[in-house]
Image (cartoon, rainbow, N blue to C red):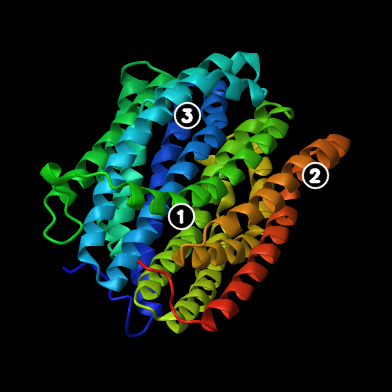
Amino acid sequence: MKREIDMLSGSLWDKILVFVIPLAVTGILQQVFNAADIAVVGRFVNENAMAAVGNNGSLVGLMISLFIGMSLGTNVVIAQYIGHGDRTGIRRAVSTSIIAAAVGGLLFLALGEVIAVPMIRLLAVPEEIFGMTLLYLRIYFLGMPVIFLYNVEAAIFRSKGDTRTPMIVLIIAGVINVGLNLFLVCVAGMTVEGVAIATVVANLISAAILFVLLCRSRDDLKIDLKELRFDRQEFLRIVRIGVPSGIQSMVFSIANLCIQSGINSLGTTVMAASAAALNIEIIAFYLLNSFTQACTTFVGQNYGAGNIIRCKKVWKDCILLAIIFTAAMCITILVFSRPLLGLFNKNPEVIELGRIRLFYLYSAYLFSLLADISSGYLRGFGKSLTPALATVFTVCGTRILWVYTVFRQHGTFGSLLLVYPVSLGLNALVIGICALLFSRKILQRPLQEKL
């Protein structure tokens, strides 16, 4: 079956959903497989091991957010070339992205090993789980090169509308991850190191499969090892879009690290509840984020084709569809929150605290939806710096200030979680205004950027 999507003509709703559904399933499955790490150690080791793996969620999310954000640079540039019909530009961008991912992944591996201990200290991780937390993180960092490569490869597929291939590959790698989790913990007698090794192996497999598929591709996205070339100008163009996007994603993770330190101060029961809830709540986020990426890719192609009116329609349709589907997902998860949280831990107190977190987070999802899709709209035009700066000040600034003022004064779980709707509401307001102003401006002039 043909997996490319014609983003330049015809109706949008059905095509956006064809793009979004496999991408959302990919993200959800990825989270399910990641949650298997916590579930396995929570069920077959102990609560301390579960808390140790859960503590790494914010740190791992920091790196993954950067990789996903930077890969958006590849996605946007190739999508614009596709819309513009520039086959040489497509091949140049693909080649440069693969080389940059390979080199960048090695650099992040080295950086991760250096910052592992200081970052865990920053989180104020209790001494009784410090060793396990550090062990998991250091093993996980060994997989940085293949994780970065996978995200860039997936972005290449997404640029032409193919979100199903990365989904199928992830399913294969995820099943292997879960099987290795159970074998290494239940049979080999490992603890946190077992689930970390399983995750690294699964990421290696997924990156390798996508690489082989790109090498065997018969279109302009094909990787020819003999013709791999690094283009400095292409790299700078990708970086101009990708780095601000990566920084914007990292800002959320940095702010969440600050919140995680507050959670850690409330004890291991709250830590375990928060870890379990995070692995459930983020399922709805992946659905929301899929509409964001759809907006970026559809706008990128149509901007490359010079169809600015259609770009604005993409923005509106993605917001409307995201509201409908994300609301349905959030309500469903809240209804079944007790049994879902029970998959991670049977402690009634952990389950109730986890439900509290879910209610607070989902109450802020409308704000998150508006901010994220508007950011994706701007990125489709190659404008990544504006939403990045807005997020730094509204999200990171608000959350850090909140932890050291409001939370320090009240010291309760609820007072800490209230920062989510406050910071996301402010972020949605600022980015929404920026997107509206930009939209008015670009509609008043012809396409001027040279692709």
**Kind of residue indicated by mark 2:** Ser
Labels 3 and 1: the sequence-earlier one: 3
Viewer-proximal residue, 3 or 52?
A: 3
Which of discs 3 and 1 lies nearer the camera? The answer is 1
Residue 98 sits above or below residue 265 on the image: below
Q: Could you say whether the residue bearing mark 1 is in a helix, strand or loop?
A: helix
Viewer-proximal residue, 220 or 332?
A: 220
Residue 257 left/right relative to 239: right
In the rendered image, which residue does mark 2 sit on? 415
Which of discs 3 and 2 lies nearer the camera? The answer is 2
Q: Could you say whether the residue bearing mark 2 is in a helix, strand or loop?
A: helix
- Mark 1 Cα-neighbour bin, 10 Å: few <14, some 14–19, many ≥20: many
Numbered circle sitting on residue 226 = none
- Mark 3 Cα-neighbour bin, 10 Å: few <14, some 14–19, many ≥20: some
| 1 and 2 marks in contact (CB < 8 Å) | no
**Kind of residue indicated by mark 3:** Arg
In the rendered image, which residue does mark 3 sit on? 43
Labels 3 and 2: the sequence-earlier one: 3
Residue 165 sits above or below residue 210 on the image: below
In the rendered image, which residue does mark 1 sit on? 241
Give the quarter of the image for residue 308: bottom left
Q: Compute the Cα span from label 3 to label 2.
A: 30 Å
Whether residue 168 is visible: no
Q: Compute the Cα span from label 1 to label 2.
A: 36 Å
